[in-house]
């Protein structure tokens, strides 16, 4: 195991669940003989994990960090910090959000946890995804990230 890196192992033969990961990928390897894909992510990276089980679906937004409340998830090499999780139709809503972020904004996976917590509220809201609110949320995050810091 690489120190401070998160390795996600996806086994082709797993009958209990399937896993898809979306984030800033450091490396990807596939061993055809044993049917395993390994995805590697840097420390402190945000990664969306989509688990599909026989009776339900889940999405987790995790950050590869060793601070805060840590949780163990299937297929991951390290304990991770779960920023939010959703089930059922919220999984589809999350996929639409991630697609929108990837299409319109660079470095969306490097946004702060505060941004992702606000995003969680937007995803959890009833009804269709409010793209106007999503765009405003991202614009506010970009402004905050680019704001000059006060030195003392």
Image (cartoon, rainbow, N blue to C red):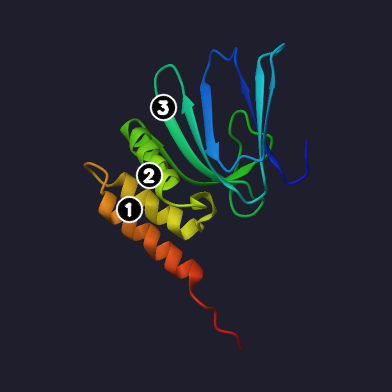
Give the mark, 2 or 3, whose residue is nearer the N terminus: 3
Q: Cβ–Cβ below 8 Å for labels 1 and 2?
A: yes
Q: Is residue 93 above or below residue 57?
A: below
Position of 47 with respect to 97 (left or right) is right
Position of 47 with respect to 96 (left or right) is right
**Where residue 66 sits: x, y (%)?**
67, 51
Q: Cβ–Cβ below 8 Å for labels 2 and 3?
A: no
Q: For marks 1 and 3, give the one nearer the viewer.
A: 1
Q: Residue at x 54, y 54 (%)?
A: 110
For the residues marked 2 and 3, what is the alpha-carbon distance in whole angstroms?
A: 21 Å
Q: Residue at x 60, y 85 (%)?
A: 151
Per the image, the residue denoted by label 3 is 57
Q: Write down the quadrant of residue 139 in the picture.
A: bottom left
**Where residue 57 sits: x, y (%)?**
41, 27
For the residues marked 1 and 2, what is the alpha-carbon distance in whole angstroms?
A: 9 Å
For the residues marked 1 and 3, what is the alpha-carbon distance in whole angstroms?
A: 23 Å
**Where residue 37 sits: x, y (%)?**
65, 23
Give the mark, 1 or 2, whose residue is nearer the N terminus: 2
- Secondary structure of the residue carrying tag 1 is helix
Q: Residue at x 39, y 58 (%)?
A: 138
Per the image, the residue denoted by label 1 is 134
Q: For marks 2 and 3, give the one nearer the viewer.
A: 2
Q: Residue at x 43, y 54 (%)?
A: 117
Q: Write down the quadrant of residue 99 in the picture.
A: top left
- Secondary structure of the residue carrying tag 2 is helix
Q: Is residue 89 above or below residue 151?
A: above
- Label 3 crowd bin: few (<14), some (14–19), many (20+), radius 10 Å: some
**Where residue 128 sits: x, y (%)?**
23, 41
Per the image, the residue denoted by label 2 is 100
């Amino acid at each position: 195991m690489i120190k401070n890196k998160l390795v996600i192992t996806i086994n082709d033969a797993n009958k209990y669940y399937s896993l898809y990961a979306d984030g800033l990928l450091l490396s990807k390897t596939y061993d055809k003989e044993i049917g395993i894909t390994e995805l590697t992510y840097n420390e402190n990276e945000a990664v969306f994990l989509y688990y599909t089980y026989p009776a339900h679906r889940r999405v987790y937004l995790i950050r590869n960090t060793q601070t805060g409340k840590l949780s163990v998830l299937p297929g991951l090499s390290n304990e991770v910090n779960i920023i939010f999780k959703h089930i059922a139709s919220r999984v589809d809503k999350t996929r639409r959000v991630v697609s929108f972020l990837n299409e319109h904004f660079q470095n969306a996976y490097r946004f702060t946890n505060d941004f992702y917590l606000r995003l969680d509220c937007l995803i959890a809201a009833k009804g269709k995804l409010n793209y106007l609110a999503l765009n405003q949320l991202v614009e506010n995050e970009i402004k905050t990230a680019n704001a000059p810091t006060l030195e003392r």
